[in-house]
Amino acid sequence: MIIIYDITLVWYVAYLMAISNGQITMGLRHANEIFESELQPLQRAFRFAGGIHGLNKQEPIMSGQFCCHSFPGGLSMHATKAIERQDLVNATELPPGLSFNFVFKGEIEFTFGNSRYRMSDQPRVKCTAIVNSSHELMSRLSCKDMQVHKLNIFVEKSWLERRCGSIEDEKRLESLFASRSVYSWVPSARTLAKARFLLNVEQSTCFEQKLQTEYLTINLLAECIEQLHRARPEEQSESGTHFQSDSALKFHIRQLTQEYHTVGDIAAALNMSERTLQRKFQANYHCSASTYIKQCKLERAKTALVFEGKSIGETAYMVGYRHANNFMIAFKKQFGMTPLEFVKLHRGARHNPMEFNGTLNAKNSV
């Protein structure tokens, strides 16, 4: 395996030298204006739900180079080498998965869950990993005139689960997704070389080129996951209630909470008694079904507040609360902030983001 990596790195270096010598041209040499419509493939590739706040559709979002590569089953890579042309907040709902980010130039500020973070190339380029154990909101702030060179690899948890070959693999994967967390570390020189190479890969419809890009993306992903295991602290703290597995029962309950609000109604929709549902759920997940249903409804409320622009009263009614005050109390208890504070956080209020100066420890888990 080491020999294969070494040969791959030699090939990378030779290819990069050819690019620098002008023998091979990759990417776009001239600045292009990039509008919202050109970023839609990224949303489709990630199957994200989201929206852009503060957008002027008549003006470009950025000028430069943007490439998005989507691979079957939940793996995507996108690269940006551009200057941002508007002050924007791009809010998305991430599915469970891992997001690996390399910022080679510029600064990126984002909100994940209830915390604000900042990535930059200073003092050194780092790899920043976002570990998302359940559907969660993420908002990315764009700053006008900021030059950004960034590579992102996103892989859904389901893509990784399908590649587990043993019980030990499954246990290691579950340990990664034990909580929603953000980590940052200085990657190896080999990893940085591969990331820089992918940053320059241009969009292509060529079958062979797409296969090679997918191979290189998976190769880099494997290194990032290996380094993420080392970067994580031995023990992690969790905030709120998180569940470590997503079985069919949980999936169906989550879907049904969009239509039903009580445990009894959901149990009836599943053709079982409320007592049976509570017993099965408690036995499998060591948590009551009512607690999980409440969490699902409050997660749905976050999406309604940020993406759909619903008022607190409308949102409370939508997720089954008769009184807005009860909804606000439950929301703050679950997420540590009021609904209004949460909306302001994801709409771009800039305040005290966490700096990445090395590996984040457990207290910075979100």
Image (cartoon, grey):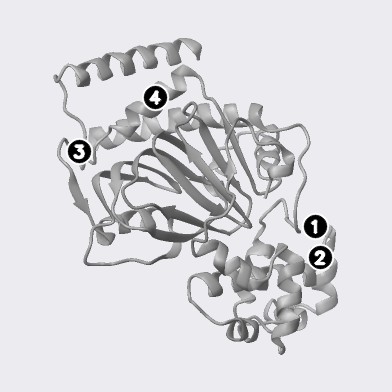
**Numbered tag placed on residue 194 in the rendering:** 4
Q: Report the mark closest to the observer, 4 or 1.
A: 4
Displayed quadrant of residue 197: top left
Q: CA distance from mark 4 to mark 2?
A: 47 Å
Crowd around label 3: few <14 · some 14–19 · many ≥20 (10 Å): few
Q: Which residue is mark 2?
A: 280
Q: Earlier in the sequence, mark 4 or mark 1?
A: 4
Q: Residue at x 85, y 67 (%)?
A: 279
Circle 4: residue type: Lys
Q: Is residue 242 above or below residue 67?
A: below
Q: Quadrant of residue 169?
A: top right
Q: Dot 3 corresponds to which residue?
A: 206
**Alpha carbons under labels 1 and 3: distance apart:** 47 Å
Residue 190 at x, y percent in the picture? 45, 18
Q: Earlier in the sequence, mark 1 or mark 3?
A: 3
Q: Are marks 1 and 2 in contact (CB under 8 Å)?
A: yes
The CA span between labels 4 and 1 is 42 Å
Left or right of 6 on screen, residue 295: right
Q: Residue at point 33% right, 66% down?
A: 55
The answer to whether the residue labelled 4 contacts the one labelled 3, judged by CB atoms less than 8 Å apart, is no
36 or 338: nearer the viewer: 338
Name the amino acid, label 2.
Lys
**Residue 299 visible at all:** yes
Within 10 Å of disc 2 (Cα), the crowding (few <14, some 14-19, many 20+) is some
Q: Is residue 260 above or below residue 200?
A: below
Q: Residue at x 69, y 64 (%)?
A: 249
Label 1 neighbourhood size at 10 Å, few (<14), some (14-19), many (20+)? few
Mark 1 and mark 2: span between their CA atoms? 6 Å
Q: Which mark is residue 284?
A: 1
Give SS at disc 1: helix
